[in-house]
Amino acid sequence: MPHKSDRTILLDARAMSRALQRMAVAVAELAHGTADLVLIGIQRRGVELAERIAKLIEKDEGVVVPRGALDITLYRDDLETVGPKPVIGETRLPVDLTDKHAVIVDDVLYTGRTVRAALDELVDFGRPKRISLCVLVDRGGRELPIQADVVGQVVKTGPGDRVEVQVEEVDGRDQVDLVR
Amino acid sequence: MTATLGKDLVGLEHMTPEQIRLILDTAEPFKEVSERPIKKVPALRGKTIVNLFFEASTRTRISFEFAEKRLSADTVNVAASGSSVSKGETLVDTAKNLEAMRIDMVVIRHPSSGAAGFLGQRIRSNVINAGDGKHEHPTQALLDLLTIRDKHGKIEGLKVCLVGDVLHSRVARSNLWGLTKLGAQVGVCGPHTLMPRGIEELGVKFFPRIEEAIEWADVLNVLRLQLERMEKGFIPSLREYYRVWGVTPERLERSPRAITIMHPGPLNRGVEIDSRVADGPHSAILDQVTNGVAVRMAVLYLLAGGRPELADAAKRGAGGGTE
């Protein structure tokens, strides 16, 4: 390592829980209820976050919110430079997306390229009447004209920084760190 | 450190178990792509692939073509008959001319053993062996491995018997390498005239009778009997072959377990395999065909990504959980 990295906690477990609660309310408001709502998590941690948000909405509204998982690896635009990703996650869309309100859920929004790929992939599965974007952390640094509709936390970062999201189901705890 | 494949896929003989597992694991998500309403992903958009077939093939060529198209590559098929090959052009000249038209990959089937490796050393494009002489047919063995893993949940420790013309079979050769590398026990069964000499030195069990093979095996991979073998005197007659070596329900009934039945196709019904077995409940023959497309997509995808020096640089620059 060239220099020692500096790690600060952006969200601890309780702060993350509150953020997700807020996000769940915001998603339900955004969709004017839950009638046509489908939550779609981007592999890998977005899938877990979508599951959490869906459960929170279900608790508040007393309805079942369908959710799916999307792996965007095969829609990336950088196979040549980044190389093939060794493990491609599952893509599972349990309902026909036509005329649904699809909410893409991801952990961090940065350049916007992942979301671009997700949009391309989603429309190959049907024609949602609307697609929204919900992220836990928006760290700025967009390279495409993409913005989130629901954000848990905004943080200013530089290109060398890293935002590391840990979720209980994958990493054993809930925490978001900023590493400079 | 994750495994990478390198430039070409020539055979399984010189691959590591990690590389083979990488292909099988990558094939898994590609199965789902073929179940989508739009059976296509843009991963290989802009890549040009030539399917160069110097030997007749239906299944393998179509399987490669589907794999290429479902990854959004542009494909051209060249068959030996009706092309400049029939005017005496050499293999390397044909390939160099294709390369001059800026292609990215060549899928080659050729009657000479070693043709794919030979070509791979002489052109810049990725080369994938779709069967070369009696040497190897790596994607067939990979789809066989994937099918076995699907049916049994593992490969290590399984007893897999290759039945029939092992001597002339590139499918058998590739299977042998793949299965032993992944820890399966391999058996062979068939007439002495169709067994390579010294095969037991590779740690392979030889079964002189099909009944013994059935008693031993978890999986039978029944090889196609090339009908011209009879003319050359390797076997007395087709009826005789069926009577002595044919995989029939009566023979399978005596097995203590349900044996998975595989066959690389095309089938000679009533010669090496009975129709009631080929269409029976333990037949995985059509699963093999389905898995073939997924395995070939995985191979194409993994080979197309190859610029490892850029990959390393990108990994250093990118942050965890950022994109």
Image (spheres, coloured by chain):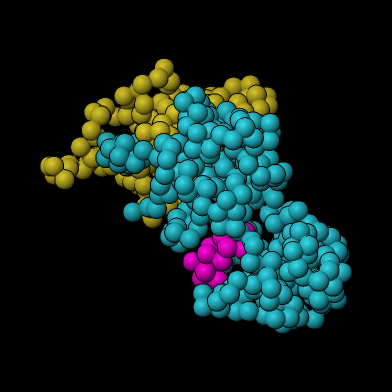
Instruction: Please state if A135 lies on the left or on the right of A11 as rendered.
Output: right
Asked which quadrant contains residue A17, the reply is top left
Place of residue A57 in the rendered image (x, y in percent of width and height, measured from the top left): 55, 38
Q: Which chain is cyan?
A: B
Name which residue lies at 84% across and 60% down: B269
| B148, above or below A16, in the image | below
Which sits in the foreground, B191 or B303? B191
Image quarter in which the C terminus of chain B is found: top left
In magenta stretch: residue A138: no
| B75, above or below A44, in the image | above
Asked which quadrant contains residue A83, the reply is top left
Image quarter in which the N terminus of chain B is found: bottom left
Name which residue lies at 69% across and 45% down: B57
Which sits in the foreground, A57 or B121? B121
Place of residue B40 in the rendered image (x, y in percent of width and height, measured from the top left): 61, 33
Asked which quadrant contains residue B293, the reply is top right
Give chain A's shade. Answer: yellow
Place of residue B304 in the rendered image (x, y in percent of width and height, measured from the top left): 46, 38
Residue positioned most to the front: B88
Which span is picked out in magenta? Answer: B171-184
